[in-house]
Image (tube, helix red, strand yellow):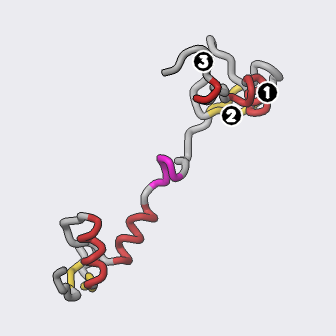
Amino acid sequence: MINMQDKTLTCRDCGQEFTFTASEQEFFAQKGFTNEPGRCPDCRAARKTGRPVGGFNGRRDREMFPATCARCGKSTQVPFQPRQDRPVYCSECYTAQRPSGGYERRPSAGSRSGSRW
């Protein structure tokens, strides 16, 4: 193993110098990262928190559209543009009309009948 020493780097965002420690360098090497960090820890944190939340970690603010529930007639809001040819349900009616809570149960591998794979 190479004996690494702390390095002083300059942040590309704020221009301040920061230390890229030997332990951070080892961590980067273990993860296979080939580039040194270009931002100081404060700018990295600000950049992360400034990003919109989405994907698997959260939800973005969505545009909501007014609708009338096709089952109970209650006014509601939905995250899509309603169409005249498709029914729209409030959350209570949508949950009630879905079979088994919306998820089909599939037989487990051990309960298959007839054939073996």
Residue at position x 38%, y 66% in the image: 47
Disc 3 versus disc 2: distance between alpha carbons? 13 Å
Q: Which residues are magenta?
A: 52-57
Tell me the residue that label 3 is attached to.
83
Q: Is residue 1 left or right of residue 43?
A: left
User: Which residue is located at x 21 percent, y 81 percent?
Assistant: 9
Q: Name the kind of residue labelled 3 in the image.
A: Arg
Q: Position of residue 103 (x, y in %)?
A: 66, 29
Q: Is residue 98 left or right of residue 81?
A: right
x, y percentage for residue 16? 26, 83
| Residue that numbered label 2 is attached to | 77
Q: Which residue is mark 1?
A: 96
Q: Is residue 38 magenta?
A: no
- Give the x, y percent position of residue 28: 27, 71
- Marking on residue 17: none
Amino acid, disc 2: Gln
- Of the image marks 3 and 2, the number of the one nearer the N terminus: 2
For the residues bearing labels 3 and 2, Cβ distance under 8 angstroms: no
Q: Is residue 75 left or right of residue 15?
A: right
Which SS class for mark 1?
A: helix
Q: Nearer the viewer, residue 46 or 21?
A: 21
Instruction: Check if residue 54 falls in the magenta segment.
Output: yes
